[in-house]
Amino acid sequence: MQQTDGDSVLRVRGLNKRIGRKTIIHSISFDVRAGEIFGFLGPNGAGKTTTIRMLVGLIRPTSGSVEICGRDVQKQPEEALKYVGSIVENPEMYPFLTGWENLTHFARMQDGIDEKRIREVAELVHLGGRIHEKVRTYSLGMRQRLGIAQALLARPRLLILDEPTNGLDPKGIKEMRSFIRELAAGGLAVFVSSHLLSEIQLLCDRVAIIGGGKELAVGSVEELMGAGKGMVIWDAEPRTKALALLGRYADIAVIDAVGAAALEDAAAALLNERSIVTETPEERVAEVLDRMVREGIAVRGVHRVAPTLERLFLQMTEGEGIE
Amino acid sequence: MNSWKWIWRVSAWLSAAASLLLIVGFVYGAGKLMFPKPNLAESEASSAAAPLTEREPSPEDGSYRIVAIGDSLAKGTGDTTGQGFARRAAAGLEEAGRKPVHFLNNLGINGMTTQELLDELKQPGVQYVLKEANVILLSIGANDLFQGGAALQTGADAPNTAALEQALPGTEERLGRALDELRKINPTAEIVYIGLYNPFGDIESLREEGDRGIVEWNAKAASLIVERDGMTLTPTFDLFQRDPGAYLSFDHFHPNSAGYERIARRIVQGME
Amino acid sequence: MKRFWAMVQNEVVKIVKKKRFYIVLLILAVLVPIFSYAQMKQSLERRESYGSDWRLEVQQAIIDNQNSLSSDRVPQEWKVYRQIYIQQMQYYLDHDVNPNEPGGVTFTREFIDNSATLFIPLMILTIASDLVSSERTTGTIKMLLTRPVRRWKVLLSKLTALLMFVSLIVASAYLICYLISGAFFGYSGWNIPIFTGFVLNGSDVDLTYVQATPQWQYLLMQAGLVWFVGVVVALLAFMVSVLVRSTAASIVVMMAALISGSILTNMASAWTSAKYLFMVNLGLTEYLAGNPAPIKGMTLGFSIGTLAVWAAVSVIISFGVFTKRDVLT
């Protein structure tokens, strides 16, 4: 499973972190290659941020190594971090400086970034005229963009973004996704963490899934997501008849209210009092639908939704996933 | 960024200049304090040649310029208002209104003896003050004769005739020298010596011995005073004779406010 | 090296843009006129009771102190202090030099003497206590430490900027004080002789080392000593700022130390091992003025040494912790 390609920009091997007696990160290993968007998926509190902090040298790993372009972050921080742009958690900038001054500030900390480059990245993230206003007055979205501008300043080979769409409006989220894709297309390796499965599905090429500080799976998105059964929301009348019909299929599981509550927000919005949430293999949907129509059940709607991260975890820990 | 360059240049240059100056100051100051050089010229030219002694006194301006010097009586110990006879006399003269009055200093020190007075008169500062004055109120001697009121308070060493007799000649001689010294410092000032009263007047057992000693002392002081020009003795013995309790303070030694007021009135009368 | 100075420049600009230094200047500009006015009132009142002759006033001060020496109620330490005061005043008087000659320069000297242990260190704290802890409060420390720069260089750039501002604060305290008080008392007095070199032997003052120093020279030495104290306070505050996450906590810790220092120097003497605490050693200018040390056995050399040790240890701790510690939040 672990690639050792020559073009891997970020190479993480056996990363452990123990604080006091508690091990909070258990041997995490993965690679991120140039031009790919790598997802780092896990619920809040799974250890994503701690891992990211170890990637950029903010936290010293208890054991294991992080290499960026072949340089160890702990042993050669100056060489290794040269190739990384990052936003850890929120993009925090000096509020009493303007956007431009913030960029200048960070540009001065390393070689080879001139004023032209600062103008370039400022334009790249569309901060436009507001670049000379104090960061204090910026919206979260603008700060996020300024943070990315800062991360791109030094023409990095690896971009690390921690929950980049957090707090953005739907339009902002869409823009952010296409922006990240653009960057990756330009040959940049992008590492994106998220607690939203849909986010990772929409954005990433490969993904590592972690939970409780442990790495549950690493692989391509299709490979891993395919492992989970798709979820279908049925909106049909009469509901009891539809339920009885669904119950006849051995490979269709009706999910109770508790399970349904764990749906991602976008999916949860589709629910009404008639909704039946099931786990249904994709290929059975047409057949079931046909049967319903024939039995005189009025089908008002059928939605296929992505399984939630929680369901995926459940499946993985049940042994259906990849160990 | 222009403002950056500007901020940086100004603060860098200013702080570099300031740091340099401060470091020099620190090294120089610390060095000077930690390895002091004895100032030979300075120590040889002791206070006798102090620049202050060479100062000419201010010209006579037709006012009373009053200084008090001597022991706790001069200072005014026992007076709850802290004025003593010195300031009260100044106030009295002011009231009489013949000349403007400037009270310069009260140099009285608790417990001062004639010997200490002689030492004090060597101080350039004291000399300066005395030169500035044209009225010098002097009270001295009681501490030589009674070893201070403190002995009385503790009851350990009550005055007795023998001790008093023994102290008399030396005290007299030193008073004479002090008067000469004062005259030498200020050749023109009116010097008013405040005579002694019997501080033990309200203690029956000590009264008689005290009386005898005081009378003897006052007589000796009076003869020293009359021998010299421009000096007067203001008697106070009688003031505390009849009703000492009314005019002495709680320590049965120093006068109280009323007592000082009476002495002051005598001084004013003597100067009229 | 060029990179390092660029980073120092960053820190300087941040301090300026954060308006910390303006606050310091503003406080001085508000306080100095208040003190100047109070001092002017006081000297007017003195003039009323002693006329224009300062010598009479000084002689009276000497006599008053002599009288308090004979009182049993005055504690022994105070007596020593007064004894020394008397001898110094006597010296000034004998040499016909007014120790309290009013003037902008004299006011500045006295103002700095009074503010050397508490007020100026407080000014320095407004910058020093904030330097590292604020980066942690705002989270910008993550941005700072994920750049390809070693941590000790980041910290050293901050420390350099801090030391620059210590010099600027001390210098501007003098400048503002002189400019403002001069408006009240006139701008002269640079050459008034000030006596230094009073060596204390118990309660006696050895006068063999006493020298008349022109006041400008005295100010220079005083400023140097104040600067040294400022540097030490800055380094200690810097360490606290590294150790403590919040700026408020870091200021409170340092202020508590400074204030306890000024309380201890007043209580003083009985507890002799207190002399190894940095806060009782901050009164370096007292040695210059010839005032007795708060605790027996303290000399200028001792105090400078003690402060230097504290400063060195705090620098070591600052760098040790900053370069090793995980940045968790």
Image (spheres, rainbow, N blue to C red):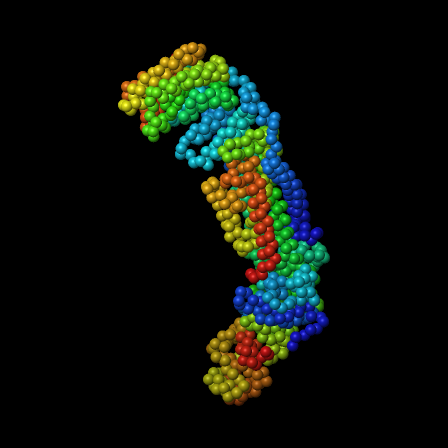
| Place of residue A214 in the rendered image (x, y in percent of width and height, measured from the top left) | 57, 72
Q: Quadrant of the C terminus of chain B?
A: top left
Q: Is residue B220 left or right of residue C60?
A: left
The residue sitting at 63% across, 52% down in the picture is C156
| Place of residue C213 in the rendered image (x, y in percent of width and height, measured from the top left) | 60, 31
| Place of residue C106 in the rendered image (x, y in percent of width and height, measured from the top left) | 56, 32
- Say which of A202 and B263 sits in front: B263
Image vertical order of residue B91 relative to residue C89, above or below: above
Residue A145 visible here? no
The residue sitting at 39% across, 20% down in the picture is B167
Q: Quadrant of residue B165?
A: top left
The residue sitting at 64% across, 42% down in the picture is B19
Q: How many marks?
A: 0
Q: Quadrant of residue C104?
A: top right
Q: Is residue B216 left or right of residue C315?
A: left
| Place of residue B217 in the rendered image (x, y in percent of width and height, measured from the top left) | 37, 16
Q: Is residue B44 left or right of residue A82?
A: left
The residue sitting at 64% across, 67% down in the picture is A65
- Say which of C102 and A105 sits in front: C102
- Say which of B110 and A149 sits in front: B110
Residue A294 visible here? yes
